[in-house]
Image: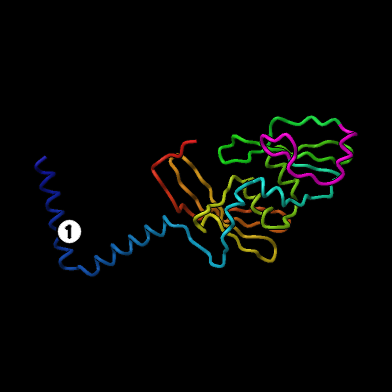
Amino acid sequence: MKGIVFINQVLVNKYKEYMLKCPISTFFIISFLALVSCKNNESSWDTGFIKIDPKLNDLNKLIQKIEPNKNYIYWEYMPEFATKPSRTEGDSLILRKHKIVRPNYGFPTCAAGMCVAHIMYIDSGNVNYVTSFNELRTFIGKVNNLEEAILLSRTDHLFIDRDDLKGGSFKKVSNGFKLYMMRHDYCPEYKESIKVTIDSSGNFDSKSNGIYFRSSECIQF
């Protein structure tokens, strides 16, 4: 044990001698390593992006702006815990010709996944239901507005950060939208910036832009 302590003391003395002889170079080396470390932990950022209205975190508001992939004779949106649809489009009289059996399941509309909703539509004489995110993507089809672009991002479990542009901003481009959305985990809590590109045909691409917030605490629901 004494031998190990002696060796460690020799190394410390050698390091002090080097620092005294080369203080400037040592400073720059340490500064460079610190800078690289910071860069590896920070998310990058593009200019020209506009803050997204935090109200658009409400999936029910996004649904109100849907323009479906085709002109259905009738369709309606039934939000969670509702007794009647919050949006209807088309000829509701057609419902008299069909037996409507509403599903008790659907796609999630809140972060914790404790609430679900569905869309019912009539096509080619048949009653159909949208109850999953995959079916919702197909129902939307082409992207006509910002709300639909955000809605497609929501189907990839991404949300809007109301406080930070790295997780809640957008830019309109010639063939669609680019967005910075947030992937949010709750235990321990962290926020990851996700850069999303959606063209007008509805093609969706996303990649991580890095973690921009991290905590050792957990959020309880």
Q: Quadrant of the N terminus?
A: top left
**Residue 28: percent from the left, percent from the top?**
28, 67
- Place of residue 202 in the rendered image (x, y in percent of width and height, measured from the top left): 71, 53
Q: Is residue 22 left or right of residue 197?
A: left
Q: Nearer the viewer, residue 83 or 61?
A: 83
- Classify mark 1: helix, strand or loop: helix
> Which residue occupies 78% across, 38% down?
120
Percent position of residue 191, x then y: 48, 49
**Residue 83 on the magenta segment:** yes
Residue drawn at x 57%, y 41% as measured from the top left: 111
| Residues packed near mark 1 inside 10 Å, few (<14), some (14 to 19) or many (20 plus) | few
What amino acid is found at the position of numbered circle 1 in the picture?
Tyr
Q: Which residue is nearer to you in this view: 152 or 160?
A: 160
Q: Is residue 163 left or right of residue 147?
A: left
Q: Could you tell me how many numbered marks the image carries?
A: 1
Residue hosting label 1? 15
Q: Which residues are magenta?
A: 78-98
